Image (cartoon, grey):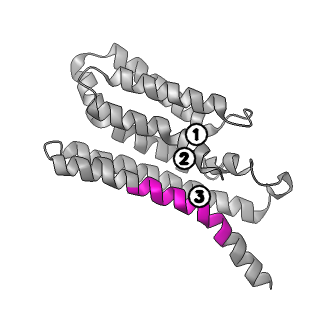
Amino acid sequence: MKSYALILSFLPLVAFSVLARWLPDGSIGVAALVAACLALIALLVARPALPPKIINVVSLVLFAVFAALGFSLGRQDDSWMATWGGAGVGIVLGLVILALVPVLPFTEQFAREEVPRSDWHSPTFKKINRVLSTAWGLAIVALGLSRVVAAALDQSHAAEVIFGLVIPIVIIVRMIKFSASYPDSVTRGQSTTRS
């Protein structure tokens, strides 16, 4: 799988989480609009364009709704959304990814760009994508939960740095490495069992 395409798909979530936390009160609509625009860009530059990547569509819809709410809610609700929105969006997006695993693992759309069509229905291809999508879903939920802890410990700068920045970066880096290495380890393991 192409890491840059996967990173681009998660960039809206990262941008929203950072902007929602660091922009001044009253800016949650702006943070969500930036994230929605990034999701739209990810949708438009994805190749092949059809069918659209499910993760990009879900992100676009989710952040468009957040933008509409952010621009229409009062200051108190906006402040609440800024505190808890980044965490909530991560949890929601992660749960959507997990819910789609039995139907269409989202990584399968990315993997099809590099795997011959003849292998798309193989048990190995399906297994790899179920595992990768499950891992990504759990990782995104973990990112959201980490942001919940950061928001709950709002008065602690150290907690914000650890739970709001360090842990999410570590999770994302580990998931990118896992996404790059897991398919090779599965196919390599199958070739040694056949020998």
Q: Amino acid at mark 1?
A: Ile
**Label 2: element kind:** helix
Q: Report if the CB atoms under discs 1 and 2 are less than 8 Å apart.
A: yes
Magenta span includes 180:
yes
In terms of image quadrants, where is residue 85? top left
Left or right: residue 52 compared with residue 115: left
Circle 1: is it few (<14), some (14-19), or many (20+) Cα within 10 Å? many
Q: Nearer the viewer, residue 104 or 106?
A: 106
Q: Describe residue 77's horizontal placement relative to residue 57 as left or right.
A: left
Q: Marks 1/2: CA distance?
A: 8 Å
Identified at 32% across, 31% down, the residue is 20
Q: Which residue is mark 3?
A: 132
Q: Point out which mark residue 55 bears.
A: 1
Which is in the foreground here, disc 1 or disc 2? 1
Secondary element at tag 3: helix
- N-terminal label among 1 and 2: 1
Which segment did they paint magenta? 170-185
Q: State the residue position of label 2.
A: 97
